[in-house]
Image: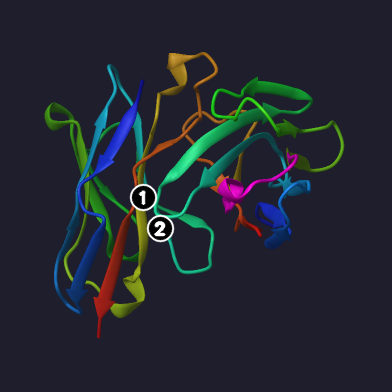
Amino acid sequence: NAGVMQNPRHLVRRRGQEARLRCSPMKGHSHVYWYRQLPEEGLKFMVYLQKENIIDESGMPKERFSAEFPKEGPSILRIQQVVRGDSAAYFCASSPVRALGTEAFFGQGTRLTVV
Amino acid sequence: AQSVSQHNHHVILSEAASLELGCNYSYGGTVNLFWYVQYPGQHLQLLLKYFSGDPLVKGIKGFEAEFIKSKFSFNLRKPSVQWSDTAEYFCAVTPPHNAGGTSYGKLTFGQGTILTVHP
């Protein structure tokens, strides 16, 4: 029973390039959450998605960031025209359809470095 | 808005010492509470959780936490730490399922506490 899978584990991008981060939730999970961990800080919520729907994107920067969770395939967090301040660890978590009384399971994260 | 505060950014202990990490939250209702641990280079792992019932919660690896509603606290404890407990520890909170709305399931994390245990 595979856990939450994120890839790549490490990603290096030059300023102005695009970064695509992938998250495959655990089997049977249709809720996905993305969090960002900036250096020296705790995890901050970015976006909450269900299959084909964005439920809550209150933590997403207004520009350059987008997320999707298509009917088939992984959830994608996309960062356009990256800047140095985007360097962080990005974690994905998933939970079951009926998440009452359960917790979210986290992936190992993608560490993005913008040079 | 919810917020979670962890009192110590970095704690340094010797093996066999006792541990208590503070966590306070602000939320105008009943919450679900969690402690996660992140070992170097690894993903977050759940240590323990509190949803309801006995406010003293036992977790994995000998950790426990006590929910004190009147103090809005959920402190993590371990009687005797080991070198392998060196990691970063995060307290987190979500609203209960019956809070409804889009915030359900969304975790609000504290800033994290780095624990270093010397052999």
Tag 2 subunit = B
Which stretch did the figure color magenta? A79-89
Callout 2: SS: strand
Hey, which quadrant is residue B11 in on the image?
bottom left
Hey, which quadrant is residue B17 in on the image?
bottom left
x, y (%) of residue B50?
33, 38
Q: Amino acid at mark 2?
A: Val
Q: Quadrant of the C terminus of chain A?
A: bottom right
Q: Which sits in the foreground, B96 or A69? A: A69
Q: Amino acid at mark 1?
A: Phe
- Left or right: residue B77 versus residue A81 is left
- Of the numbered discs 2 and 1, the one sitting upstream in the chain is 2
Q: Does the segment drawn in magenta span residue B78?
A: no
Camera sees residue B60: no
Q: CA distance from mark 2 to mark 1?
A: 6 Å
Query: Farthest residue toward the right?
Result: A72
Circle on res. B29: none
Which residue does the numbered mark 2 point to in the structure image?
A: B37
Residue drawn at the location 19% of the way across and 31% of the way down? B72
Report whether mark 2 lies on the same chain as mark 1: yes
- Left or right: residue A39 versus residue B92 is right
Callout 1: SS: strand
Residue drawn at the location 44% of the way across and 66% of the way down? B39
Tag 1 subunit = B
Residue drawn at the location 79% of the way across and 25% of the way down? A52
Q: Callout 2: 10 Å neighbours few (<14), some, many (20+)?
A: many
- Left or right: residue B46 versus residue B30 is right
x, y (%) of residue B25?
26, 32
Q: Are marks 2 and 1 in contact (CB under 8 Å)?
A: yes
x, y (%) of residue A91?
58, 48
Which residue does the numbered mark 1 point to in the structure image?
A: B90
Q: Which sits in the foreground, B34 or A54? A: A54
